[in-house]
Amino acid sequence: MRAALWLMRRFDVSEDLMGDLVEQHRHGRSIVWLWRQTIDAIAKGVGTMITREPRTALVVAIVSFCALLVWVDATWAGYTWVMVRWLAPMIRGFDAFGHPVLSRYPPLVQRLGWSWWNVYAVGMGLLWCLGGALIGRYAGDRRSGSSVVVAVLAQLPLVVWWGLPLYRNAIGYIGREAAHPMDVQLVTLTALVWFGIPLATALAGLSAPRTKRQALA
């Protein structure tokens, strides 16, 4: 029940409505009923925010969309530069498992610099999630949780656009041969794009402090 009340407060649900829901829950209503009412109240709050403050909602959506687009393109450019200019020239061969052996670096550094960053794509995926979290923080620090929802919804076209090719490539690799590194890389990136970025945006936005919250426009 505490989580439901916390969410409703983040979405500026009225204290009268929250008190009524808590009272009915204490008089026999199930926790499922409480959560259903919570989701309904949040959805109505988001709709009210969009209709009453369309300019604010539009600004939040544009900032979220453009910021994520620039962030992902910039980090991808940086990733490509690191691969071409730094990692690729240091490859002096491959081990029995097909992993490259980097000159002048111990095995642990090689694992972190190659497998973690390239094969498993964790570094790139986490950078993208970090961008989503910064956007969520920006939206959540200035408005109610409704602005965070608007920010997440604005990102969905990009998330689908980036995730579909990764998913299709992952399906093509899975089952082609046992334990192919691309299986892990593409599945990991697909999950981080489709689920990691929106979740990072939502969690960072909803956990933002309520101080200094003001209109974006």
Image (spheres, rainbow, N blue to C red):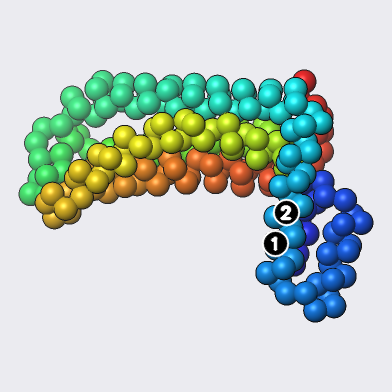
Please report the residue visible at 20 percent of the width from the left and 27 percent of the height from the top.
Answer: 88
Q: Position of residue 161 (x, y in %)?
A: 41, 31
Please report the residue visible at 77 percent of the width from the left and 36 percent of the height from the top.
Answer: 49
Q: Mark 1 and 2 residues: CB-CB less than 8 Å, in contact?
A: yes
Q: Nearer the viewer, residue 144 or 130?
A: 144
Q: From the viewer's perspective, is residue 54 above or below residue 29?
A: above
Query: Circle 1: is it few (<14), some (14-19), or many (20+) Cα within 10 Å?
Result: few
* Type of amino acid under label 2: Asp
Q: Position of residue 181 (x, y in %)?
A: 20, 46
Which secondary structure, mark 1? helix
Please report the residue visible at 40 percent of the width from the left and 47 percent of the height from the top.
Answer: 191
Q: From the viewer's perspective, is residue 113 above or below residue 39?
A: above
Q: Would residue 190 be found to the left or right of residue 2 on screen? A: left
Q: From the viewer's perspective, is residue 15 above or below residue 53?
A: below
Q: Quadrant of residue 121?
A: top left
Residue 40 disc label: 2
Residue 205 disc label: none
Q: Position of residue 134 (x, y in %)?
A: 59, 34
Q: Nearer the viewer, residue 192 or 98?
A: 192
Q: Would residue 202 be found to the left or right of residue 126 on screen? A: right
Q: Disc count in the image? A: 2
Which secondary structure, mark 2? helix
Please report the residue visible at 18 percent of the width from the left and 24 percent of the height from the top.
Answer: 89
Q: Quadrant of residue 111?
A: top left
Query: Circle 2: is it few (<14), some (14-19), or many (20+) Cα within 10 Å?
Result: few
Q: Position of residue 90 (x, y in %)?
A: 18, 29
Q: Which quadrant does the N terminus fall into?
A: bottom right
CA–CA distance in space, label 1 to label 2? 6 Å
Q: Which quadrant does the C terminus fall into?
A: top right
Q: Which residue is mark 1?
A: 36
* Type of amino acid under label 1: Arg
